[in-house]
């Protein structure tokens, strides 16, 4: 990537103050940036960095008035932070979509539709009746089962496994080792103590702009016609377990090694920390926030709840209880002292 | 799949009451089933659904007497639930064993024996001296190391990795990303703080009718001649860790993201929930039940124990303690009040 | 492997007492060893086994004086335990480095340098500009992205995925399903509740003698020029999550299913048990020890700390608090009794 400051300003709808012909090839933090890099100043707490930075260009607010001389070129915009994230995303696309063409040997089944500018790495496998959009990148050792649909601009990294009938939207990133559409954990107990496998006949649907971290697993729904649903904008970290028939609302974020049990519905814009466990068949309101390692066993009906502990309850109450827990041996001792004191009180009778 | 009601009744040893020639192609819940689908009525609590269902056929108990007119065809059997699970299993087999033949390129080493009706997907790898039974399905990117043995009717999904010398029984399903036979975590500490790797020379044996979920890992035993053993009928969910020399008894079920440390022996028909951790070198009696997120540090000698917490203890006691834990700030406050009260009691001396 | 006792003694710098020409092909525990196997006696608590063992040879301390007749051949060394671990390691190398040559089809990109005695399994993929040292073993379905560097004697098992720019040292073992260099979990929140993906431009560097367990994931650093760093001698078990920009010090050991959040720095020679969670942006002193299932939220400044619980604190204090927690319903009851007693005390007024 190499653009002039003028080109970047035009992308952002900003105004250049300084050398518009300077060439930029990278994004960086303002205190670490070099001559060929661009950075941003949003929080004025960091204003001092602007006067000492080596960055070639810095994105600032259009109303910003420097208090000292500025060596670097400025791009003036409405909102420097959001402009910088636009650049980040452009850069992300740029570095992600360089691969193209077909490496051999690769495998593709019958009756497939494949869009423009698709990359199909060596040893990638595409089954029958698969639809793949434009600009999709399928890395080596990816497995795309029969009847799978993938939207435009989606990246399927090396070793991703998509079982038959999975549907993936546009602009998604699936990291290595992701498994989507594996059988839900459903077994019918028999009288002799054995279990019969319940066939898992549904699928998984993933919306647009979803990122799924390495080695995360999403099981398919149990019944034909049903789907485990990951809605648009969801971000899943690594090594997460999403069971059959779960639904995860728009823009919800889940950190690594958390698990969601079968048929649970998670609202939109929730934030779930790492190593959290969520029970099956419950419903979480929008904007629910769950702290690391919590175990959630009950539905959450009010928005904006913040939970902690296992079983989880209100985070502030949890920390109050936990402080007392750390102090329990003391409390125990105090109670004993008090008991003795009370026992040794002279009784009314004695005192008479 | 498409069978007549008569064919299904004959498979189940049941009697038809209604249209035996009706064609059925799917299983469904009684309240959701359509004309071409079959369902069952076992719990009479749901009897009302029978009078309104759109299912083409419903399996009922042979002694069942309808209280209202029934539109659907009935199949009368001894035990509707178990008959339905027989159908589920047949259907499961039907949808699972459609693939057959060899897709190219695939790799097979020297001195292998491969049974009838085996599917070997493109980019599947089979090492030397491997034995594969009849009707086994080996999906693309599966890796079968040297000297591995696989029984009949076993499904090895895309990306499964079986290290050398692994033994898998009949009718197993291994989901994508499963790793079996990787090195146990064994390192000999040295005086300079480094560790030397202890070679892991044992293997893993898996019995019949075992299901193993996506991205689950089972390490091999440490010594030559020893095995990590997963007995018949065990069901393992996704992302589970089974360490070296562990033994899991028949028909035990473990939910996602749980882990079992080295050399632990788990009994038969245990039920272990998700995100549970089990320490090494302990023994669990048959029918032990462990709640979600528990951490078990000690052997369990009596059958039917139910445990919770970390470290885990009796589940009822755990919930009693946890209720008190949530109430600790209150208890603390009460104790303080009481202390003050007692301190302010007039002493015997004063009262004189 | 088959060596004479004399050859083994010469490797260890030891002295033979008995049949030096005896052939040995395996290592075993002293109480289980057979004629063709070698074992060791370090702890004299187990001295009795020496007089009854069937082992062909036993490694003992050079100052050891048997109290009874010994049938087996002895090898006298300075330190039997460390000599045995040397043998273990030799044996480990022996069994690990048998594969060599190139199986077809395999893929290798442009401008790669590959050393001597390298094994490249069928369906292995090597991108452009990759450097691979001598005696490296790359198993089937391994993916080595562009610009990756791998040192000598490193084993890359089947299905390992190394993203572009990853650096791996000498004598490492990467188990199946390991993912190194996947994107860190970094998203810039937008005003409308969505997130923009922050491009992850750093890499991962892994030192020498590092073992990484199956399905473990290590994310790359966020900024170009930065690395997530796994230092030499680190041992990681299965299904571990290491987030972006984490640094793990020399000879630190982490058990299965633990996770370390972004930008945390872990010292040298730490011991971290299974299913532990460590928060982001904290620093752990050398030799920190963390118990199973702990959740660590704060930096640890003093060496040799031992922690437990979630949030974690001193392990002894934790167990004291937990003992009291198990007893909480009792404590509650006692407090209630005491309250009643105190309430029923005659007041000063009454007594007057």
Image (spheres, coloured by chain):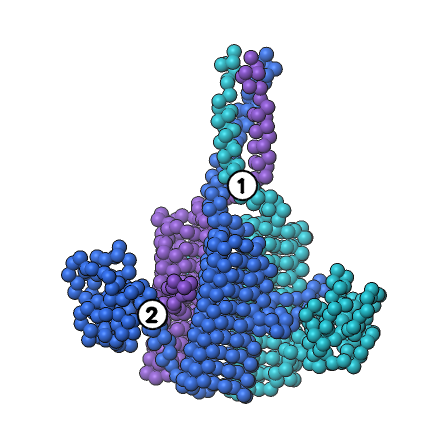
Chain colours: A purple, B blue, C cyan
Q: Is residue B107 above or below residue C37?
A: below
Q: Which residue is mark 2?
A: B86
The percent position of residue B153, horizontal first and vertical second, equals: 42, 78
- Quick one: SS at disc 2? helix
Residue B96 position by quadrant:
bottom left
The percent position of residue C157, horizontal first and vertical second, equals: 56, 76
The residue most toward the left is: B69
Q: Residue at x 72, y 76 (%)?
A: C35
Q: Residue at x 63, y 71 (%)?
A: B223
Quick one: quadrant of the N terminus of chain C?
bottom right
Residue C327 has which mark? 1
Q: Give the chain of mark 1.
A: C
Left or right? Give the position of B321 relative to C302: left
* Res. C335 visible in picture: yes
* Res. A226 visible in picture: no
Tell which of C226 and A159 is nearer to you: A159
Q: Residue at x 51, y 68 (%)?
A: B230
The percent position of residue A162, horizontal first and vertical second, equals: 40, 73
Q: Are marks 2 and 1 on the same chain?
A: no
The percent position of residue A129, horizontal first and vertical second, equals: 33, 80
Q: Give the chain of mark 2.
A: B
């Amino acid at each position: 990537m190499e653009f002039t400051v003028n080109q970047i300003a035009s992308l952002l709808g900003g105004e250049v103050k300084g050398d518009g012909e300077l060439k930029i090839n990278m994004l960086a933090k303002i205190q670490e940036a070099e001559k060929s890099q661009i950075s941003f100043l949003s929080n004025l707490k960091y204003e001092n960095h602007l006067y000492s930075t080596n960055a070639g260009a810095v994105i600032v607010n259009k109303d910003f008035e420097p208090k000292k001389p500025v060596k670097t070129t400025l791009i003036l915009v409405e909102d420097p932070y959001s402009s910088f994230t636009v650049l980040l995303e452009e850069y992300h696309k740029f570095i992600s979509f360089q691969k193209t063409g077909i490496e051999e040997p690769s495998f593709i089944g019958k009756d497939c539709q494949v869009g423009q500018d698709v990359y199909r790495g060596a040893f990638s496998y595409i089954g029958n009746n698969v639809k793949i959009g434009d600009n999709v990148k399928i890395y080596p050792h990816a497995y795309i089962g029969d009847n799978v649909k993938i939207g435009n601009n989606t990246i399927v990294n090396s070793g991703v496994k998509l079982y038959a009938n999975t549907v993936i939207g546009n602009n998604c990133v699936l990291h290595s080792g992701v498994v989507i559409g594996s059988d839900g954990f459903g077994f019918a107990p028999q009288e002799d103590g054995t279990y019969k496998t319940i066939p898992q006949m549904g699928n998984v649907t993933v919306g647009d702009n979803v990122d799924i971290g390495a080695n995360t697993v999403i099981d398919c729904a149990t019944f034909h016609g049903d789907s485990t649903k990951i809605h648009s904008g969801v971000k899943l970290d690594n090594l997460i377990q999403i069971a059959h028939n779960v639904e995860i609302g728009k823009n919800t974020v889940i950190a690594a090694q958390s698990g969601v049990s079968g048929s649970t519905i998670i609202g939109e814009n929730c934030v779930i920390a790492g190593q959290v466990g969520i029970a099956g068949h419950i419903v979480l309101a929008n904007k629910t926030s769950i702290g690391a390692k919590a175990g959630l066993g009950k539905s959450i009906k009010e928005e904006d709840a913040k939970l902690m502990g296992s079983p989880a309850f209100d985070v502030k109450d949890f920390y109050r209880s936990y402080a007392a827990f750390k102090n329990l041996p003391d409390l125990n001792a105090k109670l004993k002292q008090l008991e003795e004191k009370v026992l040794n009180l002279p009784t009314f009778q004695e005192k008479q």
